[in-house]
Image (cartoon, helix red, strand yellow):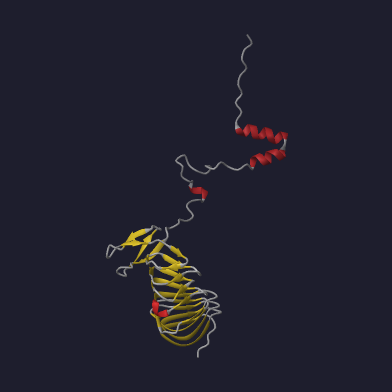
Amino acid sequence: MPGRGKTKIVDGFTTLKAIQRRDPKTADEVSEMPQPADAGKSDSGKASRGSGKGISHTVMPTRFEIICYDCGFEFKVTGRADYTFCPKCRKRLDRTDHVISGAITEDVTTAGKIHLTPDASLESATLIAGELILDGTAKSGLIQVNGKLEIGPKASFSEKNINARDLCVPVDSRITLRRKSEFRNVEIHGALRARITTTGVVIIKSGGLFRGEICSPRMVVEEGGGLIADAAINQVYENTGQEETA
């Protein structure tokens, strides 16, 4: 019987040298092959010290400001659950968001957001929300906003039926408030004519315009914003853009 020949063991270095002698171009391509995904890691699975790689950043869960619609207590929660509990009065709070169209005849209470679309009409109901976007009609009924009220360009409303902590006038909105109003913060992207008193800050964004009277502890006018008003600033006035005072 013919004897079995010896098995020759060829390592990776020997194979690479053989390829170089046969085709240098191919050898360059082989030498530049990408490393395996676990290259540079120790046997324990941890990245080696010389790799220079590690955790680049972490993402923190989103925190939401909640105002209890029962006792008015303000607190923050992490995550977006449909319900939470007030730490002060232990009231179970609904955080559901609502988009409402058509005639509104039923009360809605939520610590979340309510959006009244352009074809929505508030008739005899009461709306209580953490935030509210008013694009429809609210000449009757009652609106209580414990956070920010945003008044769209097509909104029609009665001031005496709306109470809000913060006010936002978006781009393209031209709002006139005939009654003297009080807010915490006011942010103006469009145009607002009013007599307002705030406890926080008034921000006139680029392209925004305010006319009337302001009494506030702080006001910021961004570059491109306009101010034509009697302004009483109790603490700090910061002007980062153009200003005209009458």
Quarter location, residue 124: bottom left
**How many marks on residues?**
0
Between 151 and 207, the one lying in front of the other is: 151
Q: Is residue 71 visible?
A: yes
Q: Position of residue 39 (x, y in %)?
A: 53, 42
Q: Position of residue 144 (x, y in %)?
A: 38, 72
Position of 53 compared to 109: left or right? Answer: right
Quarter location, residue 186: bottom left
Between 63 and 237, the one lying in front of the other is: 63
Q: Position of residue 75 (x, y in %)?
A: 34, 66
Residue name at image x 38 percent, y 62 percent:
95
- Where the N terminus falls, by quadrant? top right
Residue name at image x 62 percent, y 34 percent:
13
Q: Residue furthest top?
A: 1
- As displayed, is residue 7 above or below residue 78? above
Q: Residue furthest bottom?
A: 246
Between 83 and 21, the one lying in front of the other is: 83
Q: Is residue 183 visible?
A: no
Residue name at image x 52 percent, y 48 percent:
51
Position of 77 compared to 174: left or right? Answer: left
Q: Position of residue 119 (x, y in %)?
A: 50, 69
- As displayed, is residue 10 above or below residue 55? above
Position of 36 compared to 16: left or right? Answer: left
